Image (spheres, coloured by chain):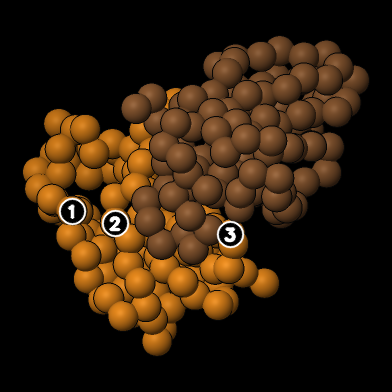
Amino acid sequence: KNQVEQSPQSLIILEGKNCTLQCNYTVSPFSNLRWYKQDTGRGPVSLTIMTFSENTKSNGRYTATLDADTKQSSLHITASQLSDSASYICVVSAGNQFYFGTGTSLTVIP
Amino acid sequence: NAGVTQTPKFQVLKTGQSMTLQCAQDMNHEYMSWYRQDPGMGLRLIHYSVGAGITDQGEVPNGYNVSRSTTEDFPLRLLSAAPSQTSVYFCASNPDRTLQETQYFGPGTRLLVL
């Protein structure tokens, strides 16, 4: 069964600190892996997209890594800001569909 | 460009009522999809379309119907609403069916079925 699992489920960090979110997937055939940010009450917004051959992709303070052999990905957020408070969703595409993780809820506190 | 638009933003229905959630995109995207998002669960695919006149079922299609008569519009119909369909519904679009490019989401429709 195609599944995407994320950890931790929730995370609270101090403003200015770094954090890393994890994603494990069992989706086949793998096409690409994305990380989305979803603010409360809004639709998800794409942060990064990585194909099988890419093992790292950055978007400002967000850096995603991909290990296609172990089927793991991580999203590293550097120097967190209050506006980073959101749900971060790992998404894997295969065939004609996307498979979504349940997300990590990140809260950044002053 | 307006991107992906959805109407209504909120809706309350009684069990057994039917309604249509509207979705439109002005980016000439080939691929469009509908998801529902429930607490503690990831977005789940209801139906998708790889082009005008072509639709297919996703993970949770029961109780929903779709059509794609134009490239721009992809309405989702609830045939006979049930409390289990209380959820937040998102429409999304992709430039093409390869799903290699950025996916764009609408703002969502919050549906409560009593």
Amino acid identity at mark 2: Thr
Quarter residue B7 falls in: top right
Cα–Cα span, label 3 and label 1: 24 Å
The answer to whether residue A102 is visible is no
Residue A97: assigned label: 3
Indicate the quadrant containing the C terminus of chain A: top left, top right, bottom left or bottom right: top left
Question: Which mark identifies residue A59?
Answer: 1
Indicate the quadrant containing the N terminus of chain A: top left, top right, bottom left or bottom right. Answer: bottom right
Q: Give coordinates of residue B76: x percent, y percent.
A: 70, 32
Residue for point 77% across, 19% down: B19
Q: Colour of chain A?
A: orange
In this rendering, is residue B15 above or below A19? above
The residue lying at 55 percent from left, 33 percent from top is B72
- Where residue B56 appears, x then y in whole percent? 73, 53
Q: Which chain is brown?
A: B
Gap in angstroms between the C-alphas marked 1 and 2: 7 Å
Mark 3 surroundings within 10 Å by alpha-carbon count, few (fewer than 14), some (14 through 19), many (20 or more):
some
A14, A47: nearer the viewer: A47
Q: CA separation, marks 2 and 3?
A: 17 Å
On the rendered structure, is A67 left or right of B25? left
Q: Tag 2's secondary structure?
A: strand
Q: Which residue is mark 2?
A: A48
Q: Are marks 2 and 3 on the same chain?
A: yes
